[in-house]
Image (cartoon, helix red, strand yellow):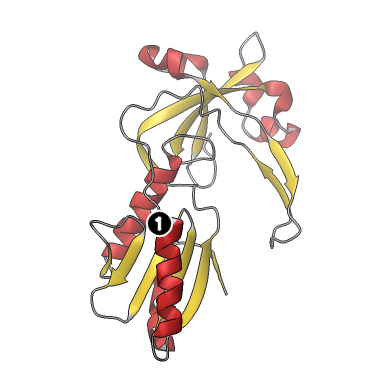
Amino acid sequence: MKAPNSTIFFIDKSQVPQDRFRDITYGKFVCTVRPQKLESNRTRLPVGGNRANCPGEVGTPTADMLIVKVVLNSVVSTLNAQFMSIDISNFYLNAPMQRYEYLKLKLTDVPEEIIEECNLREKATEEGFVYVDVWKGVYGLPQAGLLAQQLVEDRLNDKRYKQSPIIPGLWVHEWRPIQFTVVVDDFGMKYVGEEHTQHLVSVLNDHYDITTD
């Protein structure tokens, strides 16, 4: 059975490809309280990235501190310029992967309601493990950040926002007076004219839950 967002599937052990058994990693439920967030009580399932075997590049280019400072100084020195920060919620989640990942969980770590809903006792091994097929980005995977950035880059490119070919993490629009830096899921934007910043906000709102300041 798949999750509502088609990110993970609970599968039988026999459904794991033979050539991927050495790549099977683990997951660990983490519960935190973040009072500064809208959803303060959080339960997540990060994947053990140290066990995942991800061939190819997984590094994520982001703006360094010098570029962020240059943009901030540019705001101060540009007539009528203003600054806005944008944060994307759950940025690492749900980016499609061409090469799926696999993990196993202890059945005793899974909430009873999930066990019942997904019939996990039928899928569990004699040792008490259930296997999971991961189709989209989740926390902990080495490639999750790069996949998420590639996805947001494609969506921004469609609206004529372009990343600098020589300065990672620095973005401009083809004609709008907008310039912004991106560090993981945080945007720092210099703009002149409220209508232009609302354009970027609307573009991101079409795909993500965001907060602005």
Q: Could you tell me the amino acid type at mark 1?
A: Ala
Image coordinates for residue 12, horizontal then vertical, percent: 52, 19
Above/below status of 47 relative to 172 = above
Which residue is tagged 1?
63
Above/below status of 122 relative to 177 = above
The tally of labels here is 1
Task: Name the residue nearer the viewer: 172 or 22.
Answer: 172
Q: Residue at x 38, y 85 (%)?
A: 78
In the figure, residue 3 lies in which quadrant?
top right
Q: Examine the rendering and report whether any part of residue 198 can be seen.
A: no
Q: Residue at x 36, y 49 (%)?
A: 61
Image coordinates for residue 119, horizontal then vertical, percent: 63, 27
Residue 57 horizontal side relative to residue 198, left or right: left
Image coordinates for residue 134, horizontal then vertical, percent: 47, 33
How many C-alpha atoms fall within 10 Å of the one at disc 1: few (<14), some, or many (≥20)? Answer: some
Q: Quadrant of the C terminus?
A: bottom right
Q: Examine the rendering and report whether any part of residue 81 can be seen.
A: yes
Q: Point out the residue furthest to the top here.
A: 126
In the figure, residue 192 lies in which quadrant?
bottom left
Residue 80 horizontal side relative to residue 86, left or right: left
Give the secondary structure at mark 1. Answer: loop
Q: Residue at x 53, y 63 (%)?
A: 87
In the figure, residue 167 lies in which quadrant?
bottom left
Q: Residue at x 40, y 56 (%)?
A: 63
Image coordinates for residue 102, horizontal then vertical, percent: 47, 25
Q: Point out the residue furthest to the bottom here.
A: 80
Residue 92 horizontal side relative to residue 41, left or right: left
